[in-house]
Amino acid sequence: MSFREVLRIRSFRDLWLGQAISQLGDSIYYVAFMFMAQRLTGSFAMVGYVGAMEMLPYLLIGPYAGVIADRMDRKRIMLLSDLSSAAALIAFAFVVEASHGKPPAWTLLLIPFALSTMRCFFTPAKSASIPNLVPPELLIQANALSNSTFNIVGLMGLAFAATVIAQLYVLSPLNFFALLLMVNALSFAVSALFVSKLPPIVPDRKHEGDKHPLEDFKSGLRYIRSRRDLKVFIILLAAFRIGVAPFFVVYVAANTQWFGGKPQTLMWFEFTFFAGMILGSLIGARMRIRRPTMIFSLELLLVGVFIAIMAFPVLGIFVALNFICGIIVAAGDIPMTTYLQASVEDAYRGRVNSVKEMVTTGVMPLSMAGAGLSLSRFGLQGSFLLMGGVMTIAGAAGFIDRRYRDVQMPAEVYDKPVGALPDGAAA
């Protein structure tokens, strides 16, 4: 599939370019930050605590962020989020330098909490904005392009980190960590530059009126409760994320105990997953999925089975399954993301997205924080089997609910001929 049509839309192109650069910085930074947490503290449990703090804002702040995304100019929200993220990373880089590469443990918990707080506001605003920037018949293209770009730049970032930057760690851990922080800060600043070029993206609230923010949140919940597809989807995704939450902690432990413990190896594992996601995005862009909820349930089921197989420490199998899971996740997520964007009214998109993230990401901190306990009680093999079992059950449950399984994609996503662009989507 050619992405030429959707890239002709200038406002979407600006959002896409900014996010591509920001994601490049994130991909270099995230794995290395987890590696830094483990090396500085000597604790796999600390990696879990860092991950838990990263997820916690979605539970505490997510509901309010969705309300804001449905009340304010979404462009302004994204711009402030990017600039705040850049400032937080620059400040932490100075802390790392001042402490000679040994920042206080509490700062390792504070910085992921702060960055996720900013992203809590960015994510619903961005997701709600895309249908305002592209017409319905190009949503699949827009989501597939965003997904594939996310994974291509992630793959590039990991390759760069695993080769060039990893060598810097050998020479100077202090410069290694500080450089990663500054690179990611720069990526957020560039993203803010592109976001600043967008037209205003003001929610359509003509049926909502000027309500109190709390009443806005309640009306969003009522909207979700009125739709069985949204309720079941959020429940299944929450169950899946409970299973996947400890994955990176177990990943780090597997790298250390089974595969030599080098940062390069950990990054190459992530590299294969991103490579699978790229292929899966291209597959998802070409598929005409009429029953997106059924495909999503199949995704959860298959990923659960393959993660359980990772319990057997054979390097070739481990790498191959990372690649296969990447394909499945991307191919299943694109139709479901498009379905949500096309079927949810503009006035509710921010709140639906934030409630989804609040529930499905909010359940992750406890599961992630318990990863160390899982490793000590069940071992590496038992932890992989436990995670895979939870995901498999979540996927199977989606097939049991017939009303959810048979949900249809809105006809205009595939059938409506290309027409005028949405408001603000200048070519």
Image (cartoon, rainbow, N blue to C red):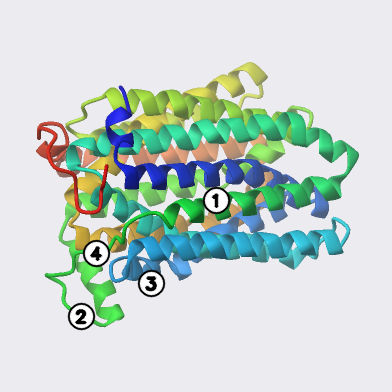
Mark 1 and mark 4 residues within 8 Å of each other at the beta carbon: no
Q: What amino acid is found at the position of numbered circle 4 in the picture?
A: Pro
Residue 194 location in percent, x, y? 46, 51
Callout 2 secondary element: loop
Of pointers 2 and 4, the one earlier in the residue sequence: 4
| Numbered tag placed on residue 203 in the rendering | 4
In the image shown, does 219 or 153 lie closer to the viewer?
A: 153
Front-lying residue, 10 or 324:
10
Q: Position of residue 366 (x, y in %)?
A: 55, 59
Residue 210 is labelled as 2
Tell me, for residue 190, which label it has, or none: 1
- Of labels 3 and 1, the one closer to you: 1
Q: Amino acid at mark 2?
A: Asp
Residue at left offset 47%, top offset 47%:
18
Q: Position of residue 121 (x, y in %)?
A: 43, 63
Q: Quadrant of the C terminus?
A: top left
Report if residue 156 is visible in the image.
Answer: yes
